[in-house]
């Protein structure tokens, strides 16, 4: 884990080592101060050397100015290193998230993922800056003050150090408790974020059903779990800090009393005693820093561990040398395909279906028959268990995911729009599209006139998830994306479900225009929208029950005819 953490310093190693050099000089300045104090008390004052007193005074002033400069450098540039590392990690984890299979997001709450990317990485940033710096300063001051203390009086120093083993034993014992407690708070923080994100996203549903109390109870439940976990963590932290501070006070008391006794016996003089007390305080400071470092380390490494959990997740799989799909005509062959969700529910079993290029195939049937599942398998949003799906004779498992999805346009029933403007949402289909291409696509989707009627036109801000638009308007923007992408294969999963009859008929004409010389897979419950399909497939829990044209299926008197009458 430490090795993985250190590699993020590599791009900033020059700045990092400059920060450590500043820390070394800062620690050296601290170590010089008691030596000057000792010299003033033992030699300058007894000898009434005013000139040397002034020189040493200016020396101290110079040291303090140096400390201020070094401290400023560490505070600013040290934090810059941490922030840049945090940005690199956030970019890396976001890139990795985009490569994860859909099943990962099915099983992990978005609020928990957000907590790992934001809260955890913030603590990692603090550790990245303060951790090495505090540890380095502590070691330098610890060893430096120890050597100087030995130089002043060896027996007195060993008396002081007799307490250190007890401090180490206590620290190690409490460290394990802290690690467990802080990991628990990480998990509960993510759960609170997930509950909050879910409640805010569904606030309209909550209000429409007057479920404010139930949502509050749900939030309070996770909030109380977080509160209890945090309280347990703070109790462990309190035990740790109070115990360590007691040992520090004990160390200082022993130094004060033992040093006073050695001065009384005449083994050290008054100047050595004063310097000794100052060095003991400096000896205690790095120990206190190490105490703070322990808490910071627990916070940061717990967050890093959760960060690495995401990074260790398997990405969507591609073959070693994937095939780039080019000049796709749109022949789709589905051979003996079976698919089971992670909850062990099998949706498709030994499905066979051929779709010729340029043809329109409609999927109908009862819910749960696997229509939407099949639509998700063709672009490899999920990987099937058995069988194969080929496009123009190439298995989609051998094709690169980018080239596969580039040649497929999908309009789903549940439309998702990004926070931003209408233009930005349309452009996600083709980021380099010109304004003329955008307008042309919007006209085909029958939404150009509506967009033009808005005060800001295509630059109109539509709010989070397109909250400022109606369901039909959102659906038309989604359809507009497919027009702009202009792929050889189109999948329409209840694409017109949110539209009124008039608008649906208008868009249906545009979709028919778009479908010319393209392969179309259409899922629809409104059978009126698929009458002109080349082939209609009735998909049930038991597989394909019927297939044929609209007239053929109506005349057969089977499932389709009953659905049509219904």
Image (cartoon, rainbow, N blue to C red):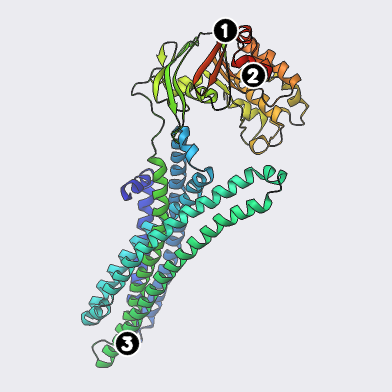
Rendered image quadrant of residue 272: bottom left
350 over 85 or under it: above or below: above
The x and y percentages for residue 560 are: 61, 15
The x and y percentages for residue 360 are: 57, 11
Measure the C-alpha gap from mark 1 to mark 2: 29 Å
Q: Which residue is mark 2?
A: 563
Measure the C-alpha gap from mark 3 to mark 1: 95 Å
Quadrant where the C terminus is found in the figure: top right
- In what element is the residue under mark 3? helix
Q: Which residue shows up at 33% across the image and 73% down it?
A: 283
Q: Residues within 10 Å of mark 3 (few under 14, many from 20)?
A: few
Measure the C-alpha gap from mark 2 to mark 3: 95 Å
Image depth: mark 3 or mark 1 in front: 1
435 over 133 or under it: above or below: above
Instruction: Work out whether residue 373 or residue 154 is closer to the camera in this orientation and state it.
Output: 373
Residue projecting furthest to the left: 155
Tell whether 357 sits left or right of 504: left
Image depth: mark 1 or mark 2 in front: 2
The x and y percentages for residue 399 are: 41, 19
Which of marks 3 and 2 precedes in the sequence? 3
121 over 438 or under it: above or below: below
Rendered image quadrant of residue 514: top right
Which of marks 2 and 1 precedes in the sequence? 1
Q: Which residue is mark 1?
A: 517
Q: Which residue shows up at 31% across the image and 65% down it?
A: 172
Q: Residues within 10 Å of mark 1 (few under 14, many from 20)?
A: some
The image's mark for residue 257 is 3
């Amino acid at each position: 884990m430490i090795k993985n953490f250190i590699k993020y310093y590599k791009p900033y190693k020059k700045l990092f080592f400059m920060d450590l050099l500043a820390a070394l000089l800062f620690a050296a300045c601290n170590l010089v101060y008691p030596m000057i104090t000792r010299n003033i008390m033992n030699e300058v004052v007894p000898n009434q050397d005013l000139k040397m007193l002034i020189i040493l005074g200016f020396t101290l002033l110079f040291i303090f100015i140096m400390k201020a400069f070094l401290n400023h450098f560490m505070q600013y540039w040290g934090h810059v290193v941490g922030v840049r590392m945090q940005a690199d990690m956030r970019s890396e984890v976001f890139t990795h998230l985009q490569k994860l299979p859909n099943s990962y997001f099915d099983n992990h709450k978005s609020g928990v993922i957000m907590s790992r990317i934001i809260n955890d990485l913030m603590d990692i940033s603090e550790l990245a800056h303060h951790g090495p710096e505090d540890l380095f300063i502590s070691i330098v001051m610890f060893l430096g003050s120890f050597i100087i203390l030995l130089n002043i009086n060896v027996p007195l120093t060993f008396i002081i150090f007799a307490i250190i083993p007890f401090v180490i034993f206590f620290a190690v014992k409490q460290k394990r408790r802290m690690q467990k407690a802080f990991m628990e708070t990480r998990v509960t923080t993510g759960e609170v974020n997930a509950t909050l994100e879910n409640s805010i996203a569904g606030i309209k549903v909550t209000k429409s059903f007057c479920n404010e109390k139930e949502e509050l109870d749900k939030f309070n439940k996770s909030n109380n779990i977080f509160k209890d976990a945090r309280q347990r963590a703070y109790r462990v932290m309190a035990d740790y800090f109070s115990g360590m501070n007691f040992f520090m006070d004990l160390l200082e008391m022993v130094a004060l009393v033992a040093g006073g006794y050695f001065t009384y016996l005449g083994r050290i003089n008054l100047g050595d005693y004063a310097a000794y007390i100052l060095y003991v305080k400096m000896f205690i400071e790095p120990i206190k820093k190490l105490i703070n470092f322990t808490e910071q380390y627990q916070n940061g490494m717990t967050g890093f561990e959760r960060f690495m959990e995401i990074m260790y997740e398997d990405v969507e799989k591609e073959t070693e040398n994937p095939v780039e799909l080019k000049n796709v005509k749109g022949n789709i062959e589905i051979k003996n395909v079976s698919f089971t969700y992670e909850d062990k529910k099998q949706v498709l079993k030994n499905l066979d279906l051929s779709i010729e290029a340029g043809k329109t195939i409609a999927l109908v049937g009862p819910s749960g028959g696997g229509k939407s599942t099949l639509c998700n398998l063709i672009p490899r949003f999920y990987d099937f268990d058995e069988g194969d799906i080929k496009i123009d004779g190439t298995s989609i498992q051998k094709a690169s995911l980018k080239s596969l999805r580039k040649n497929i346009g999908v309009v789903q029933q549940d439309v998702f729009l990004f926070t931003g403007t209408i233009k930005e949402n349309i452009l996600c289909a083709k980021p380099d599209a010109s304004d003329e291409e955008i307008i042309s696509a919007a006209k085909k989707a029958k939404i150009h006139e509506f967009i033009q009627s808005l005060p800001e036109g295509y630059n109109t801000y539509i709010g989070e998830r397109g909250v400022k638009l109606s369901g039909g308007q959102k659906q038309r923007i989604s359809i507009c994306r497919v027009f702009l992408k202009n792929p050889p294969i189109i999948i329409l999963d209840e694409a017109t479900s949110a539209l009124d009859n008039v608008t649906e008929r208008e868009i249906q004409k545009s979709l028919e225009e778009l479908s010319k010389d393209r392969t179309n897979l259409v899922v629809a419950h409104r059978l009126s929208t698929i009458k002109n399909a080349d082939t209609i497939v009735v998909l049930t829990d038991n597989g394909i029950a019927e297939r044929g044209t609209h007239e053929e299926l109506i005349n057969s008197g089977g499932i389709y005819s009953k659905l049509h009458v219904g």
